Amino acid sequence: MAGLRKERGMTQSELAAAIGRTASWLSQVERGIQPVNRLDVLRLLADGLGVPLQVLQPDAPAAAEAEPAAEAEANDLDQARLVLSGHSALDVVLSPREDFRPSTMKDLRVAAERIWDLTHTDQFAELSASLGPLVPRLERAARTAPEEHRAELHSLLSRTYQALAAAFVRQNEADAAWVAADRAIREAELSGEPLGVFASTYRLAHAFVRLNHLDQAEHVAATAIKALQRHIEQGDATPQQLSVLGSLHLMLALVHARSGERAAAKQQISDARTVAAQLGEDRNDFNLEFGPTNVEIQAVSTAVDLGDAGEALDIGKGLDSGALSVERRARLLMDLGRAHAQRRRFGDALECLLRAEKLAPEMIRTHIASRSVVRDLMLVAGRAASEELRALAGRTDAMG
């Protein structure tokens, strides 16, 4: 593989950056210290080198014939992207005025809360339609309301932009997620809510992960953890502080897992478990859904990312996620499906994916991880693929 890289005039750092891994991991792979057996990682390397998968693994199955792709649909978040593309209150900037009505505060609170409900249930089309009128209303209100309402309005804006960042990440619109997260950070600071800044920073790190900017994601999460830990050490930690701190540890675990840094990823999961034990319950502060259950869901995902399918299945066995959002429950099933696929239990993998699709169809049909595992299942099955698998591949456009 090193020869292929050099033929293309790429350094280890350049190839590692192109595939979202670290140069040290790639060096270990090229020297045979770090074996690569997973089909998805081999495909990632092949794509980075610009060669067919079979060049790196001659016995890899050739691309299976897929059913005709359905006509392309517009992205469910197109309208939300337009809202994010400009300034939503230009008329107020040009002609400052005080036209805010305090009676609208209740409606704005309800509307902002509903945005998160739609995000947690992956109803992206409805989310996008709701954001169209809501964001301009909030932006105008934050500039025209009396001082007594402005802090809350900035907080509502921050929460709305956080939801938008989370939705964009799930639909693989990471550049838009970056913009939304950055705006959420600013609005949280204007609201005077420090923990909102840290929760928004979590969303920013997620955008960097999706962009494969793992060094930036690590910097964002690690810096936030250090600052928050230092603050907590000065007094008793509140449940909200623990929720944010634990979520940041999970974010850093994700970053290290995607970088192939096994020991570091497992240490972050351990740190998150410690925080969750201190918290003692599943909570949803800042819509982070942090608690003992979510830590184990992330532990399953981390184990899958590291190729430890057996560990992932052991952790997921009997894990009750019923009290969490539809998105979290579907994510667990999706990751268990990925684990079964790694163990070549293809029937079990398909069953998990279909169950996840029933819970959150939009997530399973658009999430990059689910599409990847469906593609792998189709490649292995070839012409023997079941009708259920072929139908799922068509719905996810996994072979497109």
Image: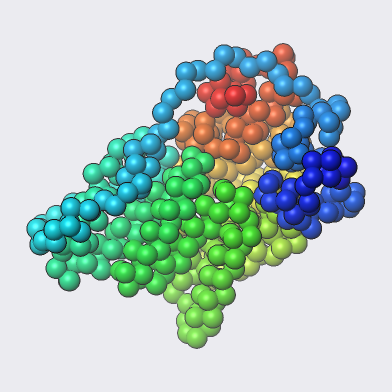
Where does the N terminus fall, quadrant-wise? Answer: top right
Observer able to see residue 240: no
Q: Quadrant of residue 313?
A: top right
Determine the residue positioned at 59% across, 65% down: 219
* Residue furthest to the right: 32
Q: What's the colour scheme? A: rainbow
Q: Give whichever of 266, 16 is nearer the camera.
A: 16
Q: Is residue 95 left or right of residue 376?
A: left
For the point 68% across and 58% down, the residue is 256
Q: Position of residue 229 (x, y in %)?
A: 54, 77
Q: Give me the residue at 43% from left, 39% from top.
A: 122
Q: As displayed, is residue 278 above or below residue 348?
A: below
- Where is residue 146? Give x, y as percent: 14, 68
Q: Where 222 sits versus 49, above or below?
A: below
Q: How many numbered marks have been drawn onto this rendered protein structure?
A: 0
Quarter location, residue 381: top right
Please, which residue is most extreme toward the front here?
9
Residue 231 locus on image (x, y percent): 49, 80
Q: Quadrant of the C terminus?
A: top right
Residue shown at 56% from the left, 20% from the top: 394
Q: Is residue 281 left or right of residue 160?
A: right
Q: Is residue 73 above or below residue 26?
A: above
Q: Position of residue 388 (x, y in %)?
A: 60, 19
Q: Nearer the viewer, residue 283 or 371?
A: 371
Q: Can residue 103 be spotted in the picture?
A: yes
